[in-house]
Amino acid sequence: MKGKIFAVIASVLFLGVCIVGGLYYFENYDEFFYAKVDNSRVRKLSSTEDMKYEYTLDCYNKNGKKRELDFKTSRELKEGAYISLEVRSAGVYQWEEAEYDDLPQKVQEKIK
């Protein structure tokens, strides 16, 4: 009987450690993507929240792999500006404007 109780407790503890470790990994997983702002691909949201615009842009990682990303902003972005997007497991975590010369070479080849 004691062996079964020990096995159940050990299993529950192991499962808990796996869940916490997985959540920590996914919360801290991040990757950067880069895009050129195209205001024809923005949609004004009808909410009263701070985020009033939603963009859907073709973005590229440092290796030039394309991925379409959605993210919200509080303002309309400058047409043609380059941006860097930090992406975590739940989506775009934050973005900021970037200079063309600061973009990875493979990204520069994709978005001129």
Image (spheres, rainbow, N blue to C red):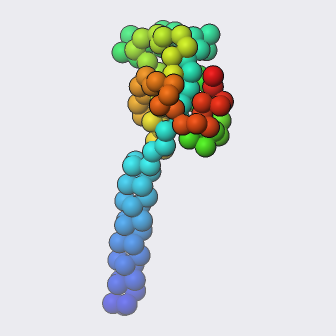
Relative to 85, say whether 31 is above or below: below
Q: Can residue 83 be seen in this view?
A: no
Point out residue 77 in the picture as x, y percentages from the top left corner. Answer: 47, 13
Q: Position of residue 57 (x, y in %)?
A: 60, 23
Q: Nearer the viewer, residue 85 or 70?
A: 85
Q: Residue at position x 42%, y 65% from top?
A: 18
> In this picture, is 15 found above or below 1?
above
Q: In which quarter of the image is residue 35?
A: top right
Count how many numbered circles sit on residues in the image.
0
Identify the residue at horizontal 35%, vertical 84% (top origin): 6
Q: In this view, does 38 lie above or below 16?
A: above
x, y percentage for residue 103?
51, 32
Q: Is residue 23 left or right of residue 105?
A: left
Viewer-nearest residue: 72 or 77: 77
What residue sits 62% from the left and 10% below the top?
40
Q: Quadrant of residue 50?
A: top left
Q: What residue do we see at 40% from left, 83% from top?
A: 7
Image location (x, y in percent) of residue 17 = 37, 67
Quadrant (top left, top right, bottom left, bottom right) of the N terminus: bottom left
